[in-house]
Amino acid sequence: MMNDFLLVLPELILTVSGLILMMIAAWAGDRAAPALTWAAILTLATAAAFLPGLASPGGSAFHNLFAADPFAAYTKVIVYLAAIVSLFAAMSWFGRDRDYRAEYPVLVLFAVVGMGMMVSASDLLTLYVGLELQSLAAYVLAAFQRTDSRSSEAGLKYFVLGALASGILLYGISLLYGFTGTTGFDGIAAALGNDGVSTAELFGLVFVLAGLAFKISAVPFHMWTPDVYEGAPTPVTAFFASAPKVAAMALLVRVAVEAMGPAAGEWRQIVIFTALASTILGGVAAIGQKNIKRLLAYSSINNIGFALVGLAAATPEGAAAVMFYMTVYVVMTLGAFLVVLRMRDANDQPVETIASLSGLSRTRPMLAMAMAIFMFSLAGIPPLFGFWPKFLVFQAAVAADLTWLAAVSIATSVISAFYYIMIVKMMYFDEPAPAFAETREPVGAGLILASALFVSPLGYLAIPALSAATLAAAWSLF
Amino acid sequence: MDGFPILSAILALPLLGAVACLVSSAAAARWIALVTTLATLALCIGLWATYQIGGPQWQFVEDAALFGNAFRWALGIDGIALLLIVLTAFLMPICIAASWEAIDRRVPEYMALFLFMEVLMLGTFMAQDIFLFYIFFEAGLIPMYLIIGIWGGANRIYAAYKFFLYTLLGSVLMLIAMLWMVNYAESTSIPVLLNTDFPPQAQTLLWLAFFASFAVKMPMWPFHTWLPDAHVQAPTAGSVILAGVLLKLGGYGFVRFSLPMFPEASAQLVWVVFGLSMAAVVLTSLIALVQQDMKKLIAYSSVAHMAFVTAGIFTFNRQGIEGGLVVMLSHGLVSGALFLCVGVVYDRLHSRDIDKYGGLSNNMPAYALFFMVFTMAAVALPGTSGFVGEFLALVGAYEANSWLAAVLTTGIILGAAYMLLLYWRIAFGTARTEEAAKLPDLTRREWAMMAPIAAVVLWMGVYPESFLAPMRQDVAVLLERVARAAPEGDAHVTAGAPAPAAHEGEAH
């Protein structure tokens, strides 16, 4: 029992300090918000230091409800880092408008606890509880600017559609439970492996995948993404695009491999369809966008599609490629959002139109260069590091005899390259729009610089370390 | 030189220069770029001087496992790569000089992008790891997109998009083919892959995937439509680099990958290459004949000349392949020089319309002289570099297929027609506009750009052995590799029975 608690130590740390911070927030009020944010960042760093499965072999806790394996540990490191970065971003962004409030870091902490549960779930019920904890915190975060009707709309939309997806997921869980007699991943895998996949089990599998596809915003369950990304305050969008995406993707990989591994032939078709649909729609629909946040929403749909190509391979290399993909994706996306956070007009009001980026290379050359690096990297053009995860997922697909899938999806990447280079064209070829307001924010600038360096060709030097970590993580699932 | 990673040093030098340019003023950036490119050229000449002709196939080899098991930092060159590297390094300082005054805004960025471009092009020729090759090959899109888009002409944005997306679409499928090959051969090393026999039924698809990429890059008719747009809109130095080096990547790819890695597929699909080459020579020459825009004319002539390269490479015989390679080198010099000639008058009159000029030999004698040398080289006059390459390619083509040789020869006649017409309309007669009659002759900077190219063009035309010698052994290796699949030519060359020479005594 004691050992079980050691395995969930990071979650315990986060939960307890989340509760304490909530109490402080209630009494000290919004004045304490920056201090609370620093405390939350410190908590996340502490929790990361106690992650089981990182240095130790880890294990499984509470009668196989909770897996603390290298896969979970790797994902949690990414999630914690993404949460830390988005907390920094939120603190300075809201702080500038003087409407930063003390519950923000608390909500982020709870969302992170939920994500930790998700990626460690080895039982459908743990999965569901984690997912809901994360989602509930996220609904509130989306509506965080109460006075802004767009933000409230985003929160409501996210909640209604999210609730629907939870319903679908729960229905799938109940079907799987009904026909396999268990909610444990290993039990389900055993049941599916023993006597083949029955029609009812297939239904359950489809519903579970549909519910999870909503969380990673894969086509055809992506409709909420552009609206929520556009309406939510920008730091919240940055958070949504990073940590929860990684967690949901990791969860999907774990469910697909651990629980539904024997049914790989069945779910592979679904994954291939959503992958291709996401890469195509994420490419085509982004072309006409006028709002940079909507554009980045479609960009995330597009990138999720590519990551799913790695999952379709259903091999350890494929799963490792997915995790590698999500790691680099998070850095590129957070970097791009950190640039978007600096888009403010002369009156210090945030602007979100793509046109306002025009001629940025003349008014703010360094910022434009960073954004150009992120855009080319998201498009997957070598020598930027964004090329490498795409390379890995295609490699995994080719190794799994899915050469046609790799060929088709790489061809669709040309569609998405169009709108990424359109942003570069705006910044470099067009006449300057009014300059953005000055920002004095060394932490933000440092984070942009760090992410730009990571996705620059220097990132390739990280390949040995990252491949070793992702492969170790992926092997713990198989 | 043993042990010193000279290839990495050649790559590092322009890279450092690029970073230095970014953080300096316009005037300083120009000098940094010039000094860096000249130093790189000096290193590359050193490379040529120390290259052992007839030595090991791969020289100056470096190999470091910087990136784990995924791929390696493996560099090394053979004679073919060596000459293309020297060509690149030779054209670069000239490009910088050509941009000295023509580029007056955002100079540090411009110079940095050019130096970055140089790194990528040199890296492409040096890479000995197939994925390292792909990264260098593909990365060239970014600087070229920015160069066309920022410093280009009126319609630059369309041209930049078209260039980027067209060439990207061409090359993505090649990556999948590479992944398949590496998966099959379990090695990313190009020398290993060169000696791997891929199953013939897979070769066809692999060949087509590589063909999609190289045919667009080359460009072959009908995949050439991005080239006139890109050339016309790019700044002068951009056109020089595009015509001089970037187009050579396609030909290099055919020689390095398509032919030796997929000999059976190459033999099987040789009709595609021949057919497209024949169509290209005739059609694009005819198109060039009716152009009003000088740059467009030279761009179409590039497509026609590249058809000699593709036809020569796929003849499967020594003359053809060596001819194709020499045409690549020669065209790199000549078309680059022709774009410089256009740039010289464009800088003065800001027009590329042929009808705005005329009679330039009266007021610009030195310019007219250089322009004539390069025109004659483009027409393949004996004594210039163009003759050597096209003659060899035609000999090779005749051995492989008489029809091919016949049609390609028509191309030479058409080429003479459009080039002489261009020269006549620009340099002879009387000036058609008052401005053209007042144009001043070459400055010393322009002399310094033109004279070295003219010298090398004549050198290559008079003593081609300097350029053929380093490649000879590598072409032999290539021929040995493809011999098993070489299609039979229709020339049926047979050695005659040696008859004793008639003796004077018998006459009595």
Image: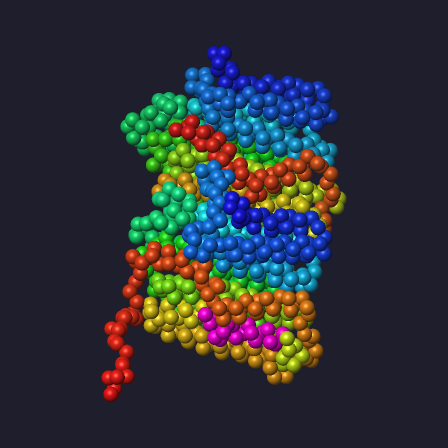
Q: What stretch is highlighted in magenta?
A: B367-388
Residue in view at x 66 percent, y 23 percent: A39
Left or right? Give the position of B190 relative to B353. Answer: left
Q: Is residue A123 magenta?
A: no
**Residue A158 place in picture, x, y as percent:** 55, 35
* Residue A32 visible (yes or no): yes
Residue B202 or A42: which is nearer the viewer? B202
Q: Where is residue B507 in the image (x, y as percent from the top left)?
A: 25, 86
Task: Say above or below: A35 vs B505.
Answer: above
x then y, percent, for residue A470:
47, 32
Q: In this view, does A189 lie to the left or right of A248?
A: left
Observer-nearest residue: A429 or B179?
A: B179
Front residue of this view, candidates B214 and A229: B214
Q: In which quarter of the image is the C terminus of chain B?
A: bottom left
Report the residue at 42% width, 76% height from top: B410
| The quarter of the displayed image where residue A26 is located | top right
The type of colouring in the image is rainbow
Residue A65 occupies which quadrant of the picture?
top left
Q: Identify whether B3 is placed above or below B140.
A: above
Find the residue positioned furthest to the top: A2
Q: Is residue B378 magenta?
A: yes
Residue A106, image x, y percentages = 63, 25
Identify the residue at image location x=48%, y=63%. B467
The number of numbered discs placed on residues in the rendered structure image is 0
Q: Is residue B446 left or right of residue B378?
A: right
